[in-house]
Image (cartoon, rainbow, N blue to C red):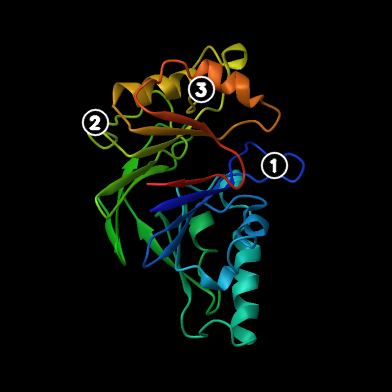
Amino acid sequence: MRVTVLGYQSPYPGPAGATPGYLVETDQIRLLLDCGSGVLAQLGKHYPIYELDALILSHYHHDHVADIGVLQYGLMVHQLFGERDPHKPLPIYGPEAPNVNTQSLPYRNATAFYPVQENTDLTLADVHVRFLRTDHGDGDPCYAMRLEAGRKVLLYGADSGPGTNWGSFIREADLFICEGTYLDHNLPKTPNGHLSVRQAAELAEQHACRSLLITHLYHAYDSDEVLRQAVAYTVGNCHVAQIGLQIAL
């Protein structure tokens, strides 16, 4: 597998930035994990959108789904232009609720929606995907994803607070994409469904993840400071998300 960071910022994109979106490639498939604001413009630097095979959504907060509407328009146009099969809608996999979000995911022949739950197992070409509900605040489901292909494991933690029951789901991931929404100075006293950089590093260390990508960062954070606050992680390489960063597993 190869992972490309298309967007990582939150709650909104900085100048020339993008909110969460990650391109996952194997020899057989191209998957997009989340589709935040600015992600499609970054994807276009690598592939045209009509070459995507599937989109998997962790949840429906705006910073993770803002580009879906324009993705649908774009795919419709590519079908009209003969660049994508008009009878082959892009499958979108995402939480089964809330309905106010899921009802807009099927769009003409451009996209189709397939709901997932915590016990859902997906096999997409050579990638096997499992889901885990995270501690993320408002009662609507948010799912972390464990993707396995070619004996490699990618763990996308999505948005996940300290109350997430990871169990063995995260153990010995080859790459853990983990949010570090807060730095020490702005970490809320009451947990609110997000981790700090320091907590992300401690979590990856505890579960012996072979490498760590810290993401979901405010666009004005200094990368060197993020690395300093990730000092607890010593098992492998620690990456700070940047647009265009590619990691091969």
The residue that label 1 is drawn on is: 13
- Label 3 to label 1, Cα distance in Å? 19 Å
Decide if residue 175 is in sight here.
yes
Residue 167 image label: 2
**Is 87 rendered above or below residue 235?**
below
Identify the secondary structure beneath mark 1.
loop
Q: Is residue 76 above or below residue 40?
A: below
Residue 68 vs residue 217, the one in the foreground: 217
Q: Is residue 97 visible?
A: no
Residue at x-position 75% and y-position 46%? 16
Picture coordinates of residue 229 (x, y %)? Answer: 53, 16
Question: Do residues under tags 3 and 1 come within 8 Å of each other at their CB atoms?
Answer: no
Residue 226 placement, left or right of 59: right
Label 1 to label 2, Cα distance in Å? 32 Å
The amino acid type of the residue labelled 1 equals Pro
Of helix, strand and loop, which one carries label 2? Answer: loop
Question: In the image, 73: left or right of 61?
Answer: right
Residue 182 drawn at (x, y percent): 57, 22
**Residue 127 vertical placement versus 249 (above, below):** below
Q: Name the residue that disc number 3 marks.
A: 197
Q: Position of 249 compared to 246: left or right?
A: left
In three-dimensional space, the C-alpha distance between marks 2 and 3, rounded to whole angstroms, equals: 20 Å
Q: Residue at x 35, y 55 (%)?
A: 116
Please report whichever mark, 1 or 2, sits nearer to the chain's N-terminal start. 1
User: Are discs 2 and 3 less than 8 Å apart at CB?
Assistant: no
Q: Which mark sits nearer the N-terminus, 2 or 3?
A: 2
- Measured along the vertical axis of the image, is residue 11 above or below residue 37? above
